[in-house]
Image (spheres, rainbow, N blue to C red):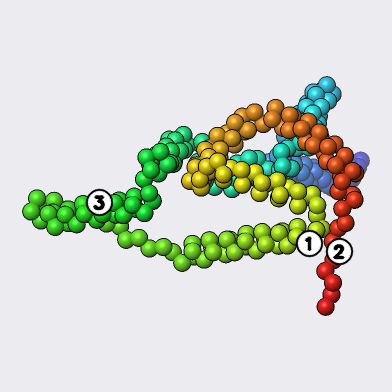
């Protein structure tokens, strides 16, 4: 009877020790897992929700935008395909050169354009209406300018004023070379066109040149070279501005007139030009 409690205590003691060890292992593992999970939560924050996508445009808005874009493109294409005088494809400002001379002709700066036109008018009145000659004008202008500058330079020491500052004028070589090359190119092109016309290869161009020369001879018989130059200068200062302002209306009437000219030319070609013998199409090889 005395051994039975001892046996129960011996059997109960190892179970209690194992239970304690298991409880310690379980508690330590739980703390580690909870700490690791906490650290994972701290190290890897929860990603924020992605932003909501922008609402897609309505189908009616997309259709309206595409229709407006196509309409503007069609209008621009139609405007580019409109009839233009002399078959030009560029604005009149670029046709005139696109630089400062074109700005003067198109009155981009009204003060400069008015000054240039007024100066040309004064020169024309001086030489044409008053009968002043060019050589006499140049001689008198140089005499007056040199006399004033000479007296000013010598009298500056007596009147306690600074002498006149006369700028040094040097014509750059590049400018002269470029002008000479451009003039040479235009003259050679004119000679080549005259040669092609003289060979009888293009009757249409021949008639245009003959009509232009005939009109020039009529103008030359009515006025001298200075007056003709002044008329051309005034036309360059007035016609391009008016044409730019009423471009569409003028081109509409020009198209109608050009169609009528082509009809008359076709009749004239069928009745007259087709019966005129033409020159060889190619030069004979030596």
Please tell me how many numbered marks the rendered image carries.
3
Give the spatial CA distance, label 1 vs label 2. Answer: 8 Å
Question: Mark 2 = which residue?
Answer: 280
Give the image quarter of residue 255: top right
Pointer 2 local density, CA inside 10 Å: few below 14, some 14–19, many at least 20: few
Question: Mark 3 = which residue?
Answer: 144
Secondary structure beneath dot 3 equals helix
Q: Residue at x 33, y 52 (%)?
A: 136
Name the spot of residue 80 as percent of width and height, x first: 75, 37
Q: Residue at x 59, y 36 (%)?
A: 240
Residue 24 in the figure: left or right of residue 5 = left
Mark closest to the chain's N terminus, 3 or 2: 3
- Contact between marks 1 and 2 (CB within 8 A): the answer is yes
Give the foreground label among 1 and 3: 1
Q: Quadrant of the N terminus?
A: top right
Q: Quadrant of the C terminus?
A: bottom right
Pointer 1 local density, CA inside 10 Å: few below 14, some 14–19, many at least 20: some
Secondary structure beneath dot 2 equals loop
Q: Residue furthest left?
A: 158
Residue 97 in the figure: left or right of residue 89 = left
Mark closest to the chain's N terminus, 1 or 3: 3
Give the spatial CA distance, label 1 vs label 3. Answer: 55 Å
Give the spatial CA distance, label 3 vs label 2. Answer: 62 Å
Q: Residue at x 57, y 61 (%)?
A: 183
In the displayed structure, would residue 191 be above or below residue 206? below
Question: Mark 1 = which residue?
Answer: 199
Q: Nearer the viewer, residue 100 or 119?
A: 119
């Amino acid at each position: 009877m005395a051994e039975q409690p001892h046996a129960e205590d011996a059997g109960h003691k190892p179970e209690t020790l194992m239970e304690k060890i298991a409880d310690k292992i379980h508690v330590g593992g739980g703390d580690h897992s909870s700490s690791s999970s906490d650290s994972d939560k701290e190290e890897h924050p929860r990603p924020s929700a992605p932003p909501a996508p922008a609402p897609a445009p309505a189908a009616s808005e997309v259709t309206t935008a595409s229709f407006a874009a196509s309409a503007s493109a069609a209008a621009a294409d139609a405007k580019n395909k409109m009839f233009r005088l002399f078959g030009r494809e560029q604005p009149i400002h670029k046709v005139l050169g696109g630089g400062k001379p074109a700005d003067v002709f198109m009155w981009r700066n009204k003060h400069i354009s008015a000054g240039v036109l007024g100066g040309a008018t004064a020169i024309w009145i001086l030489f044409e209406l008053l009968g002043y000659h060019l050589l006499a004008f140049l001689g008198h202008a140089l005499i007056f300018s040199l006399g004033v500058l000479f007296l000013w330079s010598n009298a500056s020491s007596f009147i306690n004023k600074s002498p006149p500052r006369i700028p040094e004028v040097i014509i750059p070589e590049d400018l002269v070379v470029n002008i000479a090359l451009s003039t040479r190119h235009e003259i050679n092109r004119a000679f080549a066109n005259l040669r092609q016309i003289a060979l009888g290869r293009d009757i249409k161009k021949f008639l245009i040149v003959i009509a232009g020369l005939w009109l020039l001879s009529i103008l030359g018989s009515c006025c001298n070279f200075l007056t003709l130059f002044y008329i051309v200068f005034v036309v360059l200062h007035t016609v391009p501005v008016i044409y730019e302002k009423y471009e569409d209306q003028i081109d509409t009437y020009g198209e109608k007139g050009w169609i009528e000219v082509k009809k008359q030319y076709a009749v004239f070609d069928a009745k007259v030009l087709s019966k005129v013998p033409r020159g060889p199409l190619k030069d004979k090889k030596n």
